[in-house]
Amino acid sequence: MAAPRKPFDPPTQEQRAFLEQAIEQYGKAIYNFALRLTHNEADARDLTQEAFIRVYRAWRSFVPGTSFLSWAYRIVTNLYRDELRRRKGRYQEEIPEDNAPQAFGGQRPLAVTPIDEYVDRQLSEPISKALQALSVDQRQVVILADLEEYSYQEIADIVGCSIGTVRSRLHRARSQLRNLIQHYSATST
Amino acid sequence: MNEHLNHDDFIDYLHGECAPGRDAAILAHLNGCEACTTAYDEEARLGELLRAHAKRTERELPYGMSASIWERIEREQTAQRPGWAGAVAALLRPAIAVPAAAALVVAAYFGVTALQHGPARPSIEAAFYLNDHAALTRTVPFSEGGSVVPSTLASDNVGTDQQAIALTGSTSESNGSP
């Protein structure tokens, strides 16, 4: 994933420790956020890697006491937007391989709760398809509002838009999701 | 609140984004309206489905991701250490490149101007003309109304000066001066 290069300052022990801790504590969350945005494992890996490089370079601009994840999500969001612009919206999207039932020999692993089992069996694929069908802006807002449970203000800060835009995107996205899930559920049965 | 609520109300309510008064009014309405409660439950269910789906599809950070991040950082830092390529790159920095380019432009301008005026004419030293003039004067007597050697050439022609002084002196004597 190409990105404008900025010269590294000589690394310090503090800087290295900052990145090590960031990867250890938030690596999984950032990778999953990238995966939900891109719906593509290779792109999610690249996006995560690039995000941590940015975290390393800009570690001094992180304000202690503020949410590291919000800061990191903002970096991921900006990188993803730049990449989309670079590719002119030709981001390849694919259904994650592990989602395919054949990956488990036609059977799913045991679900943790009954609702998980139900969702997994009945709605996982329609939901996945419906999320992919949303526009990038709408998907970002749904992920941040419904999965990460950020407030509208926090989402506006991460995405870089107004609260009103967040609200309207979320309303439209959820309306579309309802219809799309219904549509994909009907076509898959 | 007598009017029914819409999906936008439910979404803001679910995300805790309603003002306190509005929040209380929605809650009061939901407690007394079965149709709105059903619609609200549908909206809430959508959020639950999304979270359950996210939980099911959550992945661990890919193996080797941390190592590949550090590897890339090391690689970029190594690439930025100064070598011959770095020295060349340093020369191309604006602080050096801009004055150098300005000097080149000035040099090019004067070069073009010189070419437009044609080749430089051969120069002859002024002393040559003066010496030539003195020599001519010496060989052509009485040419300058009695002054044989110009005073400017006096130092170059000591012998001639002496002759001139002698000649002038003899002239004044012959004129009958006291």
Image (tube, grey):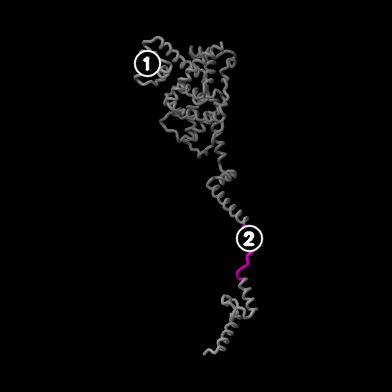
Q: Is residue A37 visible?
A: yes
Residue A5 in magenta? no
Chain of the residue on which disc 2 is drawn: B
Q: Is residue A89 above or below residue B22?
A: below
* Segment colored magenta: B117-127
Q: Residue at x 64, y 76 (%)?
A: B136
Q: Amino acid at mark 2?
A: Ala
Q: Which residue is mark 1?
A: B26
Viewer-nearest residue: A124 or B131: B131
Is disc 2 placed on a helix, strand or loop? loop
Q: Amino acid at mark 1?
A: Ile
Q: Residues within 10 Å of mark 2 (few under 14, many from 20)?
A: few
Viewer-nearest residue: B98 or B55: B98
Q: Is residue B129 left or right of residue A69?
A: right
Is disc 1 placed on a helix, strand or loop? helix
Viewer-nearest residue: A135 or A94: A135
Looking at the rendered image, the quarter that the N terminus of chain A falls into is top right
Q: Is residue B16 left or right of residue B50?
A: left
Q: Which residue is mark 2?
A: B120
Residue B119 in magenta? yes
Chain of the residue on which disc 1 is drawn: B
Q: Is residue B110 above or below residue A110?
A: below
Q: Is residue A110 visible?
A: no
Residue A163 sits in quarter: top left
